[in-house]
Image (cartoon, helix red, strand yellow):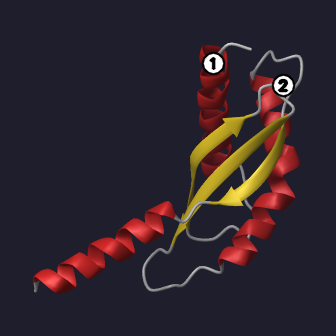
Amino acid sequence: MRKQRLLGIEKQMTRIISNALFMEVKNPKIQGMVSVTKIEVTQDLRYADAYFSVLSVGDNQVDEVMVLEGLNEIRKYLRKRVAEETNLRYVPEIRVFLDDTVARAIKISNLIDKVNN
């Protein structure tokens, strides 16, 4: 399959899943600010690895394990939403992963600020 098509599918899935998380999902396990950072679809369109970043809001610490459980609970719903909004013959099975890139970047930024002060 052409790489351009895969990139288009990944972009479309990112938009659909982000909208579903923001507007439709009301799972109490999904706390804090959860956003889709990346979707990677396999060549055969059987699997889509969805990477989510989780940030704490205010002083409340977020239990990332609980958020991951919540995301795993709604992944079939997310797949259904992708199926409804696309015209793919095979809708990829969504596998959920936490992406800590944003948290690490914030931590590094804080360390640099400490060194500069």
Residue 38 locus on image (x, y percent): 58, 44
Instruction: Establish if 102 lies above or below 19.
Output: below
Residue 24 locus on image (x, y percent): 70, 48
Instruction: Establish if 75 lies above or below 93.
Output: below
Q: Earlier in the sequence, mark 1 or mark 2?
A: 1
User: Which residue is the site of mark 1?
Assistant: 3
Crowdedness near tag 2: few (<14), some (14–19) or many (≥20) residues, C-alpha within 10 Å: few
Residue 86 locus on image (x, y percent): 76, 20
Identify the residue shown where x is 45% and y is 62%.
102
Circle 2: element type: loop
The residue under label 1 is which amino acid type?
Answer: Lys
Quarter of the picture containing the C terminus is bottom left
Crowdedness near tag 1: few (<14), some (14–19) or many (≥20) residues, C-alpha within 10 Å: few
The residue under label 2 is which amino acid type?
Answer: Asp
Identify the residue shown where x is 75% and y is 55%.
96
Identify the residue shown where x is 66% and y is 75%.
64
Residue 29 seen anywhere in this rendered image of the structure: no
Labels 1 and 2 touching (C-beta < 8 A): no
Quarter of the picture containing the N terminus is top right
Residue 2 seen anywhere in this rendered image of the structure: yes
Q: Is residue 110 left or right of 81 when viewed as pictured?
A: left
Taking depth in this image into account, of 26 and 80 the one nearest to the observer is 80
Residue 116 locus on image (x, y percent): 11, 81
- Give the quarter of the image for residue 79: top right
Tag shown at residue 34: none
Taking depth in this image into account, of 116 and 53 the one nearest to the observer is 116
Give me the C-alpha separation between circle 1 and circle 2: 12 Å
Circle 1: element type: helix
Q: Is residue 68 left or right of 22 when viewed as pictured?
A: right
User: Which residue is the site of mark 2?
Assistant: 44
Identify the residue shown where x is 54% and y is 84%.
61
- Give the quarter of the image for residue 14: top right
